[in-house]
Image: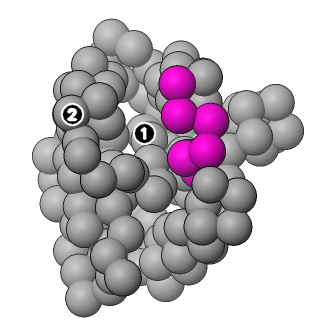
Amino acid sequence: MMHHVLILDDEADVRAAIRLQLKGTDFEILEAENFEQAMKLLQQNVISTDVIICDVRMPGVDGVEAVQNFQREYPNTPVIVLTGFPDVDLAVDFMKKQDVTDYLTKPVDKDKLVAAVEKAAQERRMFG
């Protein structure tokens, strides 16, 4: 069964690296370079997105605001936060207040990424 993962990151090379790491898994990848593009993909997509991977630092709408919007509009879709600038306070905030599924740092380890996405997709199946 195919699962759909939306990667929201303003850096094309990061999106490409994640796509490569998830290659050969049961995940089909959608990519967006900004929040507006991500929302458009989510709204247009006939198939439901199982997991959203969202960068923290982006121009325009940042990751915190994006995650809040995703959780309001798509409350059953798990969000994994990805950052190149690890911040313990921000991580705690995301995990507790924002209720994100996981908080990963770049460059993300392939096994950690695949495990996090699989776990999030399973949560989606159980609760979605």
Question: For the residue carrying disc 1, how many other residues have a C-alpha within 10 Å: few (<14), some (14-19), or many (20+)?
Answer: many
Q: Kindly give the residue lying farthest to the front in the view shown.
A: 46
Residue with the mark numbered 2: 44
Which image quarter holds the N terminus?
bottom left
Q: What residue type is labelled 1?
A: Asp
With 112 as the anchor, is 30 left or right in this view?
left
Q: x%, y% of residue 49? A: 38, 51
Q: Which residue is drawn at 23% across and 81% down?
A: 23
Q: How far apart are marks 1 and 2 (CA)?
A: 21 Å
Q: Tag 1, which secondary structure?
A: strand
Which stretch is magenta? 73-79
With 98 as the anchor, is 21 left or right in this view?
left
Reply yes or no: does residue 1 show up in magenta. Answer: no
Question: For the residue carrying disc 2, how many other residues have a C-alpha within 10 Å: few (<14), some (14-19), or many (20+)?
Answer: few
Q: Examine the rendered structure and indicate whether residue 125 appears above or below residue 39.
A: below
Q: Kindly give the residue lying farthest to the top in the view shown.
A: 60
Of 98 and 62, nearer the camera is 98
Of 105 and 24, nearer the camera is 24
Which image quarter holds the C terminus?
bottom right
Residue with the mark numbered 1: 55
Of 10 and 53, nearer the camera is 53
Q: Residue at x 73, y 32 (%)?
A: 98
Q: Which residue is drawn at 25% across and 88% down?
A: 24
Q: Which amino acid does label 2 sit on?
A: Gln
Q: Residue at x 44, y 48 (%)?
A: 52
Q: Tag 2, which secondary structure?
A: helix
